[in-house]
Image: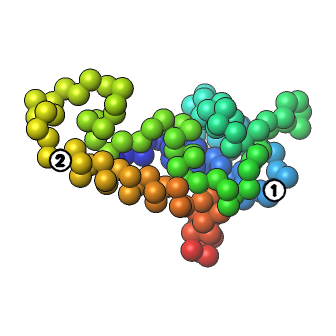
Amino acid sequence: MNISTRGRYAIRALIEIAEKGEKSVLTVKKICESQDISTTYLEHLMVKLKKSGIIGSHRGTKGGFFLKMKPEEITLFDIITSVEGPVFLSKCLKTSDKIDCKFSKDCYLRGIYSRLSRAVEDIFKQVTLEQILGEKNGRG
């Protein structure tokens, strides 16, 4: 399993917003400057995070993005699945894809991969943005 730049950048952007406080509004430009992320790339991620209900936005000169949920309500699972879609340990667990494996009929590993994926998903669901902030600030 690999968390792509989409997931990592989304987490960094949300940490940036959360660190500024509950009522803070940050522009994509501000986040990009401090996190060294491409503006176009981050804008794409912010649209996905907004669609999922994690963040909201204000337009205008005082506009930008803000958290719609409290940091303790936002899980790593919420963030990653918002920008990356479902997370699978192995391609063979994707039900929408045709399994292109000559061993799929008699596979003895699929069950193990499935249990591992569920365990990782459970951990992602337990870790909150607040906990990540605590780790970053040495409170973890």
Q: Residue at x 81, y 56 (%)?
A: 22
Which mark is first along the chain, 1 or 2?
1
Camera-nearest residue between 50 and 126: 126
Rendering quarter of residue 92: top left
- Residue that numbered label 1 is attached to: 22
Residue 102 point in image, percent of width and height:
10, 29
Kindly give the residue lying farthest to the top in the view shown.
98
What secondary structure is found at the residue carrying circle 2?
loop
Quadrant (top left, top right, bottom left, bottom right) of the C terminus: bottom right
Q: Amino acid at mark 1?
A: Glu
Camera-nearest residue between 42 and 58: 58
Instruction: Please state if 10 lies on the left or on the right of 22 as rendered.
Output: left
Instruction: Please state which of the two labelled residues, at mark 2 or mark 1, is closer to the viewer.
Output: 2
Camera-nearest residue between 129 and 137: 129
Q: Amino acid at mark 2?
A: Leu
Give the Cα separation between the discs numbered 2 and 1: 45 Å
Task: Work out whether 71 lies above or below 32.
Answer: below
Kindly give the residue lying farthest to the right in the view shown.
61
Asked if the residues shown at circle 2 and circle 1 are in contact, with their CB atoms under 8 angstroms apart, the answer is no
Q: Residue at x 31, y 25 (%)?
A: 97
What secondary structure is found at the residue carrying circle 1?
loop
Density class for disc 2 (Cα within 10 Å; few <14, some 14-19, many ≥20) is few
Q: Residue at x 67, y 56 (%)?
A: 73
Task: Work out whether 1 lies above or below 41.
Answer: below
Asked whether the viewer can see residue 71, the reply is yes
Residue 122 point in image, percent of width and height:
46, 57
Residue 11 point in image, percent of width and height:
57, 49
Asked whether the viewer can see residue 39, the reply is no
Camera-nearest residue between 91 and 29: 91
User: Residue 109 bears which disc, if any?
Assistant: 2
Residue 60 point in image, percent of width and height:
88, 30
